[in-house]
Amino acid sequence: MKTQKRNQGFTLIELMVVITIIAILASITVPVVTKVKAKADLSRDISNCRQVILACKSFAADWEGVYPSYDPDKAAQGGGGGDDSGDFSTSTDAFNVLIKQGYIDTESIFWMSTKNPAKLRPPVEDARLETNENCYTYVMGLTDTSFSRSPLVADEQEGPGTYGQYHPWLEMRKAVVGYSGGHVNAERLDSAEPGAKVITKDGVDIFAERTSEESTDGLLDVPQSGILNP
């Protein structure tokens, strides 16, 4: 008597079980991968900021201790370095001096992966940094003898020390800040909402003005007018 062979294909129930298992694994894996990628991007941001800080310190070593606040070539010709007063009006102006003077040889370190629709593409390496290629804030007016904890370079801000909806680390409540003394930290934001302020571990507002040597209100060693965005 011949026996009927069992169909070797999946039954509908078996297929549904497999799909359910895959869905569960995906729901576990995707957030982990996303978190790992975000941490890697944050580490890259810290590294880029550190390179900019080192370039600023090299500039200061060659120009009487002053971090970029003017264009040496224009100053030599009797002009200023930025606007009519001789000051820079944007962080892009200051960073272009670092590129032009040879302290930085790539524009890519001024860009990071961001949600900002105006800055979705990496820079074109043409030795000229544009506003849409720059994702960093710069503080003008500092020198290599300024308060070492005063911020010098940071992620692009919405306002002095505050971060908006396009900040890539808003949900992580982090912001990268490089200081006049040369160190770079991923500092804490006081919330994960637009308008969040960047503060130290002991609650000091990093971009609030430091009014005296004993002041604990802020760390900024120049007026807030010196904080330049792209």
Image: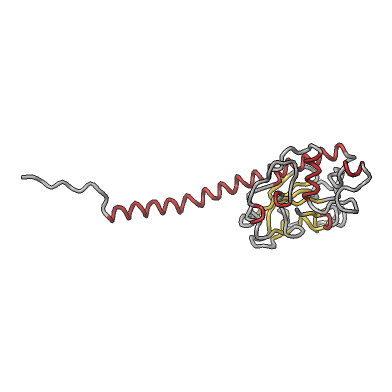
Seen as rendered, the residue at the extreme left is: 1
| Residue 131 rendering spot, x and y as whole percentages | 73, 52
Furthest residue toward right: 78
Q: Where in the figure is residue 222, as x and y percent of width and height?
A: 85, 54
Render colour scheme: secondary structure
Quadrant of residue 145 in the image?
Answer: top right
- Residue at image location 64% in from the left, 56% down from the top: 117
Q: Residue at x 77, y 58 (%)?
A: 160
Please tell me how many numbered marks the rendered image carries. 0
224 w.r.t. 33: above or below:
below
Q: Is residue 119 left or right of residue 137?
A: left
Q: Nearer the viewer, residue 173 or 202?
A: 173
Query: Residue 203's x, y, as percent?
Result: 73, 57
Q: Name the residue located 70 percent from the left edge and 58 percent from the top edge.
A: 163
Quadrant placement of the N terminus: top left
Q: Quadrant of the rendered structure where residue 27 is?
A: bottom left
Query: Is 209 situated left or right of 176 in this image?
Result: right
Side of 4 where 204 appears, left or right: right
- Locate residue 45, reporting x and y percent: 67, 46
Q: Quadrant of residue 106?
A: top right
Q: Name the residue located 84 percent from the left edge and 45 percent from the top edge.
A: 68
**In this orientation, which residue lies closer to the viewer: 82 or 211?**
82
